[in-house]
Image (cartoon, rainbow, N blue to C red):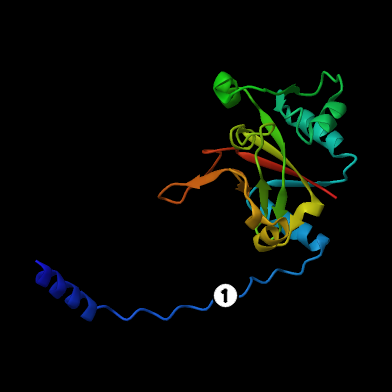
Amino acid sequence: MSNARTTILSRLTSTRPDLPQEQPVQSEQEIPAWDLDQRIEKFSSRLRSVRADVIVAEHEIWPEKLATLARQRGFENLLYAPHGPLGGQIEKAWGDNPSLPRLISHQKEIEAWKEELFFQIDAAITSTRAGIAETGSLVLWPTVDEPRSYSLVPPVHIAVLDAKDLYASFAELIKIEGWRRGLPSNALLISGPSKTADIEQTLAYGVHGPIELIVFLLR
């Protein structure tokens, strides 16, 4: 038995193919040297090319623009996080105006209100951690206040991005944000409304998520 094993190993060793030489480690990816205006232009054009809407607004007036948009679109309700980074601004803009959509929030497990979330919510709004100009992508780190269902389930997802958090590329984002030091349990990269295609390459929107993506880009 021992001799047979040795013979087999010898045959395998003698016929071992030559493995390619170890490739040198590639240098760090070059980051485009775009200024803020260029980043905004590229980010906006990338998203608009996939049927997303980008609204550039000043920090002080974006909640009023949101209220106007919600009224014009005829939303009956808007899902938001009252204890999230946008909650106070949204509530102030809404006030007691009966012509605006009803603000909805839930501090309970999704199983307790799944039916309402999937079938009765018109739109949801979330903050974002960052944006990527090169690909026209939003980066979301879901939290207890703003769970990932807010950006994945309702038919319209409204995201708010501060232009100072707009990076040229994914490589720059990872480097400056220090992702190697720690990652969340769930990070979302969103590059437009949900879309898919069948075997005949017929593109359909909203099959696996929001049919519309609206981004308020603040500067």
Residue at x-position 63% and y-position 57%: 180
Q: Give neighbour class at mark 1: few <14, some 14-19, many 20+ (Cα, 10 Å).
A: few
Mark 1, secondary structure of its residue: loop
Compared with 120, 188 (above or below) is below
Residue at x-position 13% and y-position 75%: 7
Q: Is residue 66 left or right of residue 32?
A: right
Residue 15 visible: no
Residue 62 image-quadrant placement: top right
Whole-percent x, y for residue 72 in the image: 78, 31
Residue 128 visible: yes
Whole-percent x, y for residue 19 in the image: 35, 78
Residue at x-position 87% and y-position 22%: 95
Residue at x-position 66% and y-position 32%: 144
Compared with 58, 125 (above or below) is above
Q: In this view, does 89 lie to the left or right of 146?
A: right
Between residue 179 and residue 85, name the one nearer to us. 179
Q: Is residue 192 left or right of residue 196?
A: right
Residue 167 image-quadrant placement: bottom right
Whole-percent x, y for residue 215 in the image: 73, 44
Between residue 151 and residue 145, name the one nearer to us. 145
Which residue lies most toward the front here?
Answer: 2
Between residue 7 and residue 110, name the one nearer to us. 7
Residue 135 image-quadrant placement: bottom right
Residue with the mark numbered 1 = 26
Between residue 182 and residue 216, name the one nearer to us. 182
Compared with 141, 165 (above or below) is below
**Label 1 is placed on what type of residue?**
Gln
> Which quarter of the rendered picture does the N terminus lie within?
bottom left
Figure label count:
1
Whole-percent x, y for residue 165 in the image: 77, 52
